[in-house]
Image: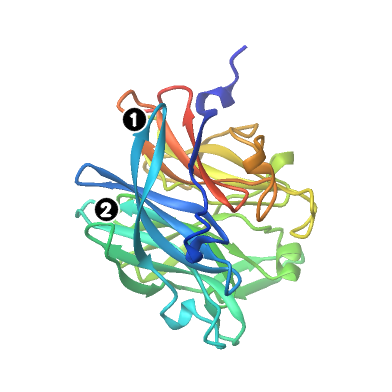
């Protein structure tokens, strides 16, 4: 019997790239890449983690080429971004990171990368926050800086309203829609609120939408997709950038099943959702079961065990979608939709 989830179910097509021990800048893992095409060439912009300093991340560029029924990455050893800006570096001058890029082509022919800058926050402690960069060729990138948010007001279960300065909290998994909606840019992101606020206001780590006129200041923050199914009980977060289909904006997102972040048995899984083309705040479809879950050795054992983490996509001529995903925070894999979606 065919179920709704089968519409976006993913089938594995193998590993695209694994760490090269002869390249010190990726000895700690390759993971969570962005993908995009420029002048007929498909590119992979992957997070490359050095073994020393610990968790020091750069974003490296490779080309993607067909191999059998899958893809292979050919390294260019080209650094797209590495920790240089203050919001990407720690005060110790040693640690820092640029992490988990997502790339969106815009209507003007440029590309916007949303990524996590892991540098010192307003209080002096290391804090992951969302930054943007722009490119015309996917190789050379100009930083646009940290995005700025207007204050967010949350009404708690007690009836009291809490005002949150989102400049001061952890935020990850951002991606931009490829076209303006209602005349404005739209961003998906995953803020994480302090535990007490999250509990009182019933807002676990979830996917939010924000809107902007200029790519700098973001407002009208709207909760989009929070944990709902049993396999999403800890958190939900962004995955692939939105893809326009006839039925709506298609996203493959990640969800975490576990008791807490320290749970050794927690699992990262992938789900699928369709958002309304004219108003992406409206969810038209959401998979009741994971469309991909950890099942191979490379997904189950790594830097972080039991992780599939979708972050990039390419489209095929027959309407199917190739989803590129992180495997246990160590390698990068490929899966494809079993049916055309375009």
x 60%, y 53%: residue: 329
**Viewer-nearest residue: 298 or 191:** 298
Q: Is residue 316 left or right of residue 207?
A: left
27, above or below 231, in the image: below
**Spatial separation of the CA atoms under disc 1 and disc 2:** 20 Å
Q: Is residue 223 left or right of residue 158?
A: left
The first of marks 1 and 2 along the sequence is 2
- In the rendering, at what x and y percent does residue 271 appear? 58, 38
x 30%, y 50%: residue: 179
- In the rendering, at what x and y percent does residue 209 appear? 48, 56
> Which element is circle 2 on?
loop
> Which element is circle 1 on?
loop
Q: Which mark is residue 106?
A: 2
x 63%, y 42%: residue: 299
Where's the C terminus, which quadrant?
top left
Q: Which mark is residue 218?
A: none
Determine which residue is flagged by label 1.
316
Which quadrant of the view contains residue 101?
Answer: bottom left
**Viewer-nearest residue: 223 or 230:** 230
Q: Is residue 312 left or right of residue 143?
A: right
**Viewer-nearest residue: 107 or 208:** 107
296, above or below 234, in the image: above
């Amino acid at each position: 019997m065919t179920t709704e989830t089968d519409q976006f179910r993913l089938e594995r097509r193998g590993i695209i790239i694994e760490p090269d021990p002869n390249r010190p800048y990726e000895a700690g893992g390759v993971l969570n890449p962005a993908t995009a095409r420029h002048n007929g060439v498909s590119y992979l912009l992957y997070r490359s983690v050095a073994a020393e300093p610990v968790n020091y991340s750069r974003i490296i560029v490779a080309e993607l080429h067909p191999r059998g029924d899958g893809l292979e990455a050919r390294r260019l050893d080209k650094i797209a971004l590495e920790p240089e800006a203050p919001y990407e570096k720690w005060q110790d001058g040693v640690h820092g990171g640029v992490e988990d890029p997502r790339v969106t082509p815009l209507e003007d022919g440029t590309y916007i990368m949303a990524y996590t800058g892991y540098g010192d926050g307003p209080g002096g402690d290391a804090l992951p926050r969302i930054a943007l960069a722009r490119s015309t060729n996917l190789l050379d990138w100009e930083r646009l800086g940290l995005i700025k948010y207007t204050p967010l007001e949350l009404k708690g279960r007690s009836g009291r309203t809490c005002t949150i300065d989102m400049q001061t909290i952890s935020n990850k998994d951002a991606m931009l829609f490829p076209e303006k909606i209602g005349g404005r840019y739209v961003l998906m992101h995953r803020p994480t609120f302090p535990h007490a606020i999250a509990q009182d206001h019933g807002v676990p780590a979830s996917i939010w939408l924000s809107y902007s006129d200029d790519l700098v200041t973001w407002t009208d923050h709207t909760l989009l997709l929070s944990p709902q199914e049993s396999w999403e009980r800890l958190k939900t977060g962004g995955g692939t950038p939105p893809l326009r289909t006839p039925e709506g904006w298609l996203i493959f997102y990640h969800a975490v099943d576990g008791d807490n972040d320290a749970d050794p048995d927690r699992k990262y899984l992938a789900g699928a959702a369709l958002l309304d083309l004219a108003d992406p705040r409206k969810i038209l479809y959401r998979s009741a079961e994971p469309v991909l879950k950890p099942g191979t050795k490379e997904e189950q054992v790594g830097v972080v065990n039991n992780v599939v983490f979708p972050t990039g996509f390419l489209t095929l001529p027959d309407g199917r979608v190739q989803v590129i995903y992180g495997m246990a925070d160590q390698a990068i894999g490929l899966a494809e939709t079993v049916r055309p979606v375009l």
